[in-house]
Amino acid sequence: MNKSIRRIWNVISIILVVIVVALTILLVGVRLIGLQPYAVLSGSMEPTYHTGALIYVKKTQPQDVEVGDPITFVLDDQLNIATHRVIKIDDANQHFYTKGDANEFADASPVHYNNLIGKPVFTIPYLGYLSAYVKDPPGRYIALAAAAVLLLLVFLPDLFDGEKKKEKKSGASGRAESSAAGDHQDVGNA
């Protein structure tokens, strides 16, 4: 492979690997430090959390939540997740009353303390679209295939270079053997 093409290939490969590693850390690796990523699928919290953003939620105890805090919670029996702002706390009944920033009215049902997941600590715009896409098929299969292709592309030049080196080495040793054999025959014939 031409050296300049090889150099360009290496730079592109490194950039792609860095992007994949960064995305993996942002989508999965943050769980190691106690954060849970969630994709924002509606505009109910605009402009705080934009549709398509990825929010990172840290587990929080109910007593650490104050009025005005955004919280992430289990919304219903289907285990849908929502993030809305706390507008009232009922400690006696262990309920939070919530409202989306962009919503005109408060949520119809209060959130029981047991349904609290945590508080969002930061967000990354647009990354939620990718997260939601790779969560289920076919996005998951496409992501796995893309990762496999990337690995192949990263290691493919090394495989070709290894074959070329073997060919050169066997060709050079073959010439050296025949040259040595020829020298030996010449010496033997003299």
Image (cartoon, rainbow, N blue to C red):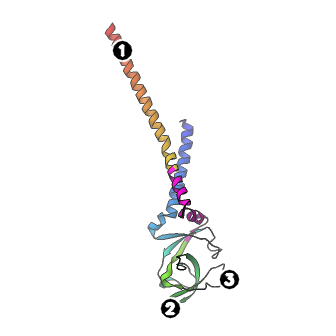
The answer to whether residue 142 is magenta is yes
Question: Could you say where residue 82 lies in the image, as x and y percent from the top left?
Answer: 57, 76
Image-quadrant location for residue 124: bottom right
The residue located at (42%, 26%) in the rendering is 172
Quarter that holds the C terminus: top left
Bounds of the magenta segment: 122-148
Mark 3: amino acid: Glu
Of callouts 1 and 3, which one flags the residue occurring earlier in the amino acid sequence? Answer: 3
Mark 1: amino acid: Asp
In this view of the protein, which residue sits in the foreground, 102 or 10? Answer: 102
Give the number of the mark in front: 1 or 3.
3
Q: Secondary structure at mark 3?
A: loop
Quickly name the residue at label 3: 104
The residue located at (55%, 46%) in the rendering is 11
Q: CA distance from mark 2 to mark 3?
A: 25 Å
Q: Is 142 on the left-hand or right-hand side of 165?
A: right
Characterize the magenta stretch by its predominant secondary structure: helix
Question: Could you say where residue 159 lies in the image, as x and y percent from the top left?
Answer: 46, 40
